[in-house]
Image (cartoon, rainbow, N blue to C red):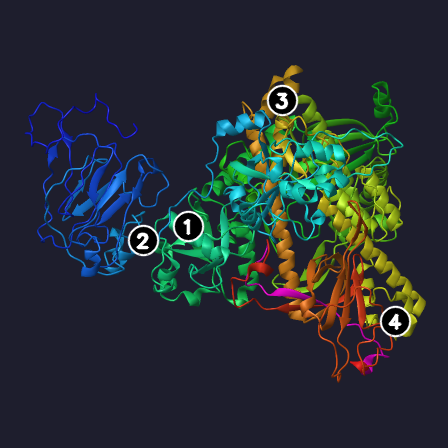
Amino acid sequence: MDGKPSSKNYPKVSPKTPRNRGPNDSQVHLPLTVLPTPSRLSVQHPNSPPVFYPRPPTAPVHNFNVPVIVGYAQPPLLTDTIYNHSQYLPGAPQCLSLKTPTSYMGRSEIINRHRPFSPTQRNAGRPSPSHPRPVRFIPGGSPSSSNCMTHQASIHTRGQSVVEPPSLHHVNIPLQGSTELPRSRANRLSRNTLLRYKLPQEQIPDLQVPNTCRYSKKANPVYIPHWSQADILAGLEDKSLLSGTLRINPKHFDDAYIKHPSGDADVFFSGLRARNRALPNDIVAVQIEPKKLWKVFDTFVKDSVPSSSREETKQRKRQSYVTLSEFLASQRHDFEQLVGVEVAKEIAEDLNSCSDPSPPVAPSENCVINHAPWWSIIQRTGKVVGIINRLHSRACIGYLTLPKSTGTPKKDKTAQAVTEADTATSTSVSSKDVANTSTNCWSHARLIQTDTRLPHLLIPRQVCPQAFISDPSSFKHVRYVARITSWPESSLFPTGELLRSLSTDSAKLVEAETDRILVVAGFYSGLESIHRFPDEVEESAKEEVYRANSAFLDELCWRTDFRPLCVFTIDPSTARDLDDALHIRSLSDKEIDELAQDGCPGATYEVGVHIADVSYFVRPNSPVDMESARRATTIYLVQLCVPMLPRILCEELCSLNVGEDKRTFSVVFKVDKYGNILRSSFGRSVIRSCAKLSYENAQLLIDNPNEDIRPDFASMIEPPHSLASVRTSVSLLHQLAMQRRQRRFSGGSLRLDQIKTAFVLDDDKQIPLGVAPAICKPSNWLVEEWMLAANESVAERLAKELPETAFLRRHAPPSLNQLSKAADSLKSVGINVNTETAGSIQASICHEAGCAIDTGYHYSAELVSMCADMAAGLSLVETDLIEKLEDFEITPTIGQDRKSFQERKAQLEQEARMLVAVSLLTKTMNLAEYFCLGELPKECTTEHYALNMEFYTHFTSPIRRYADVIVHRQLAAILAREAQNDGNAELANWYAQTVCTPGPSSKQLQTQAEVCNSKKLCARRAGEESAELFYVLFVKESGPLTEVCAVTSVLNRSFDVMLLSCGLTRRVYLQHLDLRSSSIISARRVGNRTEEGAKLCLLWNYEPNATDAPSTAQTNSAQSADITIGAGVASPPCGCFYTEVKLLDVVLCRISVEEAEEDNEDVDKKGENGSGSLPTLRVTLLRPTCSQCQAAV
């Protein structure tokens, strides 16, 4: 009401002292509340900003039973005079409860003093405690002031509770009764003051109290308010906003990105403010900034770009990148040469627009392109204006510490942020005050998160452990599980609460780290999530088991019976939830003729893909359904898994165990002798698996088609089926699958296989006994091809029948910018990759690897043995000195001659080159994602880029993926409608039992798709963290290892390597090497293309007694292999003391384990998946030596 009362609610009165009225007075009364605090009380109008002032120290003490005075109040004047005694506290028996809505905040100008003034100060005109200075209060001021007063005050007095109505007009009323406190600098009306006088804990208010510190700053909003849902939807509709999944760089916390719909380059966000309280994996609404603020890639920026003003210099320091306007001001000519004069002119004339420059005219066939696309030079920048879907769990793990003093010489960002956050809660003080204050004078502790993508978390003092408050230093190695509870616009960092601490027992390292991994994946309860579900979910699952068992015989008439056929499963040997089975049979002559007459000539075989009918047991909106929708996927770790469904369902009722009748949802193909699908049919069925084959078992049958070999598992095949029938089925399925695979790759599919690590664990599954790359066999490809066929067939049916709600999966094309950069880097080391299509990338990789395009590239099964041979047989690191092998004493592996060893070494180097190339190309690829067909933006396509399929979905793993459950329900709905159209109402009703009526809307399905995407990504990261954990334990138990590595990137003072035995990527820091000097030869670029990659030149220490050795100055970039070190020091007999490191080099590294850092604030080494207390790997390059130079060392 803008601070003015309504005439119809309040009568007009004269500005006089209110008259007391009797209880029968007919005139309207406005109650006034008398507070037993100051001798002169401010009573205000309900619509004016509220105030509260303690009493002067001279007031006498009386009892606290004060009656309520009833009277009238007039609207506030524009300026009222009030008195401020905020350095004093009400009497001890009282408890103050305050609330401050921003709508009542005003702009105030208050002068506070923390101790009495001297007579000299009084003579100078300064106020004394007994004669306070009047304070001018201006209503309707800035709502962000930290000095504004409170809206409501409640004083509890000896059994009475007197509540003041909202802000009555100022009236001075004499009042007696209070308790005097000592005059002290620390006497402030704050929570700390209440704590000092030891009030009961339940009486201490957890509220924002007016700050009386003379050094306090105004708490201006740090973030812009989030847009409303309606505004966001309107912005997305008119294309003024974009939406996407937020990604944050774990190595550079300030950098965040989302994909741009055009697919050329990501949208960039710089700093916390730009991403506006969004966390990784959140779906955000983004507003693109004007072009003048767009980022110029560092590669094209000269060493110095001058700023035109001091303000721009400050902005540069904050954003740490060069904007387009700055770039044009200093390098306009360079920009024109890069993108062309016309494009540069268009951009320069339209810097205030947010729209993309006009797309370039397509060049003619014979035209030579001399200019780079604009998006490879500059990058769009944006800001988050709203969070559409909070997919981050808001759970976090970190170390609890005290806020840093802002008065220390080295003021870091964390200290500044905590100071700003404290300012927002009206507890900020100056650096001098902080330095002179005891450790008890703080309002929030901070939680330093081990995931460097997340901001620090502010933990209120009152929820911190008492032991931490007493001795914070004893908690520096204790990790806490916490949760973000609020993040207001006025606070740079969020506020949260502590849930529990993780174990610090080193004997329980695996348990504690697994607990941490699961919390990061979104499971607050950690390891408890493995063993138990909520009680209502368990009860619902048991009810489904009872219902299913009792109704099995009645529903057989509605299901196709495949029990007489030879049906079997092929899964990993450790699998317990078996969700897919296969069968194949030759068609009879009669069936072949009927199919030929029906338009399918050439049909030869029937292939059945049978999937566990999970949607029959998990009914929509049941407790099991809601819990599985929340989990969305099963998480597989090295030693265990966290199931999506309760164990009674996923391992018993749904799992396709041998010798048990099981309900399935089947896709049945009629195929010709080449594996081409001629007809597909869908329906619910029942099967009885006759064999549980592992991939190794199936491969044994494929490799040995003869009847003479009888494997150990033959006795486990259930009669009447035999080993011969299983062998025949496996062989036929393999032959057809390989033909389908060849056609798929020849038709444009792409497969990028990276190293996957396999561990051998002890009986307790706590200690790794061995590690090796997981090798993919043809038996894996057999299952993969038929699962792909089933998924594609179901997707095509859904897209045809449900054009608005089909739940599908797409893989967007890669970022053109990133892909071109990767191709340039590979070209600089001799690997040419055609990046026009997925098929061209596949053809390029196969050409470089020397394999057939129709089979695809996969790393060799001999990778482990080749790494062992090189690590054992080489006594030096070889880079550019391979041609000088005869100068070194190399002892080949026992049983091999020199030629054989060199051949294997060359094969390993080629293997390493391909693995690095695949890794670099994989990093440019987008992640595949689920989506609802009706919600797909028009500029996006439904195609799956890598599989080269127009429509694709997931249907084959409903036990471990909730997306598959949704697809099963949609397929059941289609079959119910089809049965209804055919006049079979009973079958239609039976199918409809497991379907929502009405079904979920397209927006609801899109929301669930986003949840599935986020959870799938979390599950993948959890698996990677688990593999890293066990590899670290393996190195710790076995001692330092020598590993063969491949260089994946070269930096100024470090380089990254891939460990070929396990696929992990680690950084080698030059500071950890015994180097005399080092230098880097930067990459040579022509235009925007890299012609020659960067190269590190390393010179090792080698002279033990040199007295005139040069300093560690950088060596000349043109050094050769026979460097003369200095006068009086002989040069080495060969060049093994000089090493060059460049992309794709194969090197030997020492892998060791170093314990966690003592200082838990050193988060640089933690990264996205850092645990903070887990011992970390240190990778160092082995020093090259040879027998001729050994004496020099």
Label 2 belongs to which residue? 214
Residue 532, position in %: x, y? 50, 49
Q: Which image quadrant for residue 1173?
A: bottom right
Residue 789 has which mark? Answer: none
The local secondary structure at tag 2 comes to loop
Residue drawn at point x = 60 percent, y = 60 percent: 1165
- First in sequence: mark 2 or mark 1? 2
Label 1 belongs to which residue? 421
Is 1173 colored magenta in this rendering?
yes
The local secondary structure at tag 3 comes to helix
Amino acid identity at mark 3: Ala
Q: Which image quadrant for residue 446?
A: bottom left
Residue 161, position in %: x, y? 17, 43
- At label 4, counting other C-alpha atoms closer than 10 Å, the crowd grade (few under 14, some 14-19, many 20 or more) is some
Label 3 belongs to which residue? 976
Amino acid identity at mark 4: Pro
Label 4 belongs to which residue? 892
Mark 3 vs mark 4: give the one in front.
4
Mark 2 vs mark 4: give the one in front.
2
Separation (CA) of disc 1 from disc 4: 64 Å
Amino acid identity at mark 2: Arg
On screen, residue 12 versus residue 267, left or right, reads: left
Separation (CA) of disc 2 from disc 3: 74 Å
- First in sequence: mark 3 or mark 4? 4
Mark 2 vs mark 3: give the one in front.
2
Name the image quarter holding the N terminus. Answer: top left
Residue 1187, position in %: x, y? 85, 79
On screen, residue 446 versus residue 1056, left or right, reads: left
Q: Please state which of residues 567 and 782 is positioned toward the viewer in this rendering.
A: 782
- First in sequence: mark 2 or mark 4? 2
